[in-house]
Image (cartoon, rainbow, N blue to C red):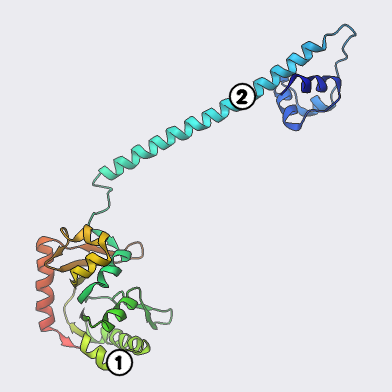
Amino acid sequence: MSGTTVSHYVTGRIRPSFHALVGIAAFFNVTLDYLVFGERVHLSSTADPGNLRADVMRALAESNAYQGRQRDLIVRVNRRLSEQVERVARELLDDPRTASPPEFFSDADALPIEACANRTRVTTSRPPADLAFGPEGEVRRGTFFDVFVSNILAGRTYQYLFHGSRARFEPYVRGYRDLLTGADLPSDMVGERVEFRVVGTELPVGIVIHDLDVSLLERREPVLWERFHDDGIVDGVFAYVSIRHEEERGGIVLYDEYFASALRMFQRDWAAAQVL
């Protein structure tokens, strides 16, 4: 603020803005009401208006300095909070108790992997992700249904092995066939490329096994290929435990003896199962 402006305040030629009044009132520790409507101090003819001008300038300068200190404090607090957040994040990432399992992947990853499978084998005691159910129990298309249909049209095959009673899974199979008919897939094509069987044993988790077209996966999904080709894909086969909870939907990759066990279990139970 220039000295001319302050002089105009003092002589009454112009009136200070609201923000200027706030600064002046804060400096003199008075209310705005007092400053605007209070008793005026009458200067004698010998009073020096320069002193008043200096007081007003000092009040405005100190008010600006106070606002500047507030801004500096906010910047420092934000910087410190950012440093603390980064430190805690690093600690969480380094702590195996809180880190997410590296082999977990979401449906967003599972879908393109299935789209590159020549054969998909599913063993489950629950409805697969291809199906969803409405409020009245009606069968609807699930998350994976479109990939399922595209793969069938491309000549790829599916084997579904349900664990439990036959009566429980027959409605699922009818739902599959109705949805496939609604997708205009010929029944003979469906019969050749999709198989359903049921075995009367319990299964605690669902397992998905893909026989992959590895060249297609490498070309179409280079990020997923880089992630799993040395750590998850074995001789072109990729297997995972299906996670279908409300909080998490995806899978956990099977390795080593778990991978081999899943393949043996599917082959054994498929041979013993009944056609649906």
Q: Residue at horizontal 56%, vertical 30%?
A: 71
Label drawn at residue 186 = 1
Q: Where is residue 148 in the image (x, y as percent from the top left)?
A: 29, 78
> Quadrant of the rendered structure where residue 158 is?
bottom left
Front position among marks 1 and 2? 1
Residue 38 seen in this snapshot: yes
Q: Residue at horizontal 28%, vertical 86%?
A: 173
Q: What secondary structure is found at the residue carrying circle 2?
A: helix
Residue 205 seen in this snapshot: no
Q: Where is residue 249 in the image (x, y as percent from the top left)?
A: 32, 65
Residue nearest the viewer, comparing 117 with 269 = 117
Residue nearest the viewer, comparing 100 with 246 = 100
Outermost residue to the top: 46
Q: Distance between the residues labelled 1 and 2?
A: 79 Å
Q: Residue at horizontal 18%, vertical 75%?
A: 202
Q: Which of marks 1 and 2 is nearer the N terminus?
A: 2
In this rendering, the answer to whether 246 lies above or below 85 is below
In this rendering, the answer to whether 206 lies above or below 55 is below
Q: How many marks?
A: 2
Residue nearest the viewer, comparing 155 with 95 = 155
Label drawn at residue 66 = 2
Label drawn at residue 159 = none
Mark 1 is on which residue type?
Pro
Residue nearest the viewer, comparing 135 with 214 = 214
